[in-house]
Image: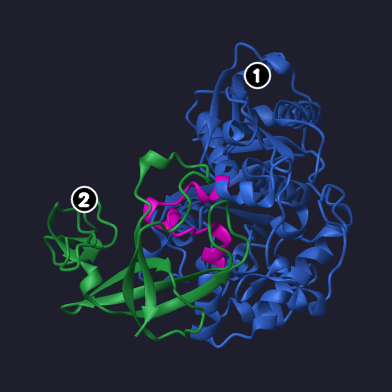
Amino acid sequence: MTDNDTPPMEAYRYADGSITYPGHPIGPDGSDPVGTVDLSEYTAEIVTWTSSTATPPGVRQPNHLAIVEFDVEDQPVRAIGQLTTDDVDIGDEVRPVYVEELRDPEAGIREPASQAWDGYRFEPV
Amino acid sequence: MERVAILGASMTQFGQRDAWIRELLAEAGQACLDDAGVSPDAVDHLYVSNMASGEFEGQTGVPNALAHDLAAMPAYTARIDQTSSSGGAGVYAAWQSVASGASEMTLLVGGEKMTHRSTAEATDVIASLTHPVEYKHGVTLPSFAGLTARLYLDTYDAPRESLAKVAVKNHRNGVDNPHAQFRKEVDLETVMESPVVADPLRLYDFCPITDGSAALMFCPESVAREYTDEYVVVSGIGGATDTHVVHERADPTTMRGVVESADVAYEMADRDPEDVDVAELHDMFTILEFLQSEGLGFFEQGEGWKAIEEGVTERDGDLPINTSGGLKSKGHPLGASGVAQVYEIFEQLTDDAGARQVEADVGLACNVGGFGNCVTTTILERP
């Protein structure tokens, strides 16, 4: 847990130094994970973004989304997530902000117990 | 290895249909048997390409149901699910069954029944292919398209109108396709002023939700010759995957699955991109026509948009793309689309495409699942 008691935005670090979010049992280089990194402690840069208006059941409308890139000790790590606003542009700096429930777990097709529903939105710095 | 031929082909009317999945599959399957002149009891293998009949309709076990409805027992049956590329994966499986010698006559039927669900429900069924870290944020396939389109336009300094021109072209082509869901032209202004779906993409940048089915009959070329002179040959085929988690790709505007599958198909066929005369690409979203045409080597990276501006991909251009109207106009019944792409190339190479006919000896179909997660590229030729 981080200092303010929110769950980490956990990425995996692999033996070759690469980092992925989410983590995988085997890394891009074919090796096992050797540690984790909490991306919520870093800021990121917006690679691209969109505002989706045709959202599935249980998802806010419109749903602002971005692919962002963190720089973790010179290692690029990308993530996708909701934005707190659509007043952004490619290249803007954002920080992760914890949200307890990103969409209504009971409204969609996926089994609610099969995954976590909390996570991090990205907020312009 | 003897070459694999496609002996017959069919597709149903695409659009909003009263028929359910079993009926749609049987309609295309029976029409394909008739087109090929093959008796049901001659079918060794029967494959059904379908993404989600259980989720959409509560009907599973469709290959066995189809074998019974077509009196094709005791044919070996299997369902091929590779999301939106289930059809292409079915083409691969059917080709493989004949090429390996396991089957001398394989019927492939692809189909999906979707329109009884609301747009939101259908979108969620399709989005269920995403990773949990994507799904919990409400990421959908259209939102991937919006994210990628913004990056493409920004990176390559392409005009927004170039994407709209893909929709205009494919709708124009669809007018002459009697099986297409939409047989109506749209103009640039209509596309550019339609409602935003995933900024910067608008309604007309997206394919519709569709019911429909299509079918192909595969056999060794020597067997095809016993039936007819009007068949086509699968000269090359390749399948590949890219990351499941889309944002983990180093360059979201490069579809590695397209590149890798095309490399295999070109090598098998001993062909180059320059040899392709007509192509059916998976234009589920307008941006995908650019990304695939670049991944297939038709155009340099970041220059696919120039082809539409210069008319290269029009029906009367140097490389007609989506003469069928594409998924954009013809419709996208998930499991049927990859099969229907090959149906269009079959029609072109057997001079049976009517008003859509172009001069072609070599055709290519590229079927994409997820947002480039799984891809099958097929090269077809006249005998």
Would you say residue B382 is visible in this rendering?
no
Structural crowding at the residue carrying mark 1, measured as other residues with C-alpha within 10 Å and reported as few (<14), some (14–19) or many (≥20): some
Residue A122 position in % (x across, y down): 38, 74
Q: In the figure, A100 relative to B216: above or below?
A: below
Q: In the figure, B303 relative to A13: above or below?
A: below
* Residue under the image location 62 percent in, 57 percent down: B282
* Residue under the image location 83 percent in, 56 percent down: B182
Q: Is residue B129 magenta?
A: yes
Would you say residue B262 is visible in this rendering?
yes
Q: Which chain is blue?
A: B
Q: Residue A26 carries which label?
A: 2
Q: Splitting the image into 4 quarters, where does residue B12 fall?
A: top right
* Residue under the image location 44 percent in, 59 percent down: B137
Q: What's drawn in magenta, residue-wise?
A: B125-145
Amino acid at circle 1 = Ala
Determine whether the residue tagged by mark 1 lies in a helix, strand or loop: helix
Q: In the figure, B33 relative to B142: above or below?
A: above
Determine whether the residue tagged by mark 2 lies in a helix, strand or loop: loop
B286 sits to left or right of A71: right
Chain A shade: green
B251 sits to left or right of B76: left
Q: Is residue B8 magenta?
A: no
Structural crowding at the residue carrying mark 2, measured as other residues with C-alpha within 10 Å and reported as few (<14), some (14–19) or many (≥20): few
Q: Which mark is residue B65?
A: 1
B130 sits to left or right of B183: left
Q: Which quadrant would the N terminus of chain A be assigned to in this image?
A: bottom left
Name the subunit of mark 2.
A
Name the subunit of mark 1.
B
- Residue in the foreground of this view, choosing between A42 and B312: A42
For this orientation, the residue located farthest to the front is: A4
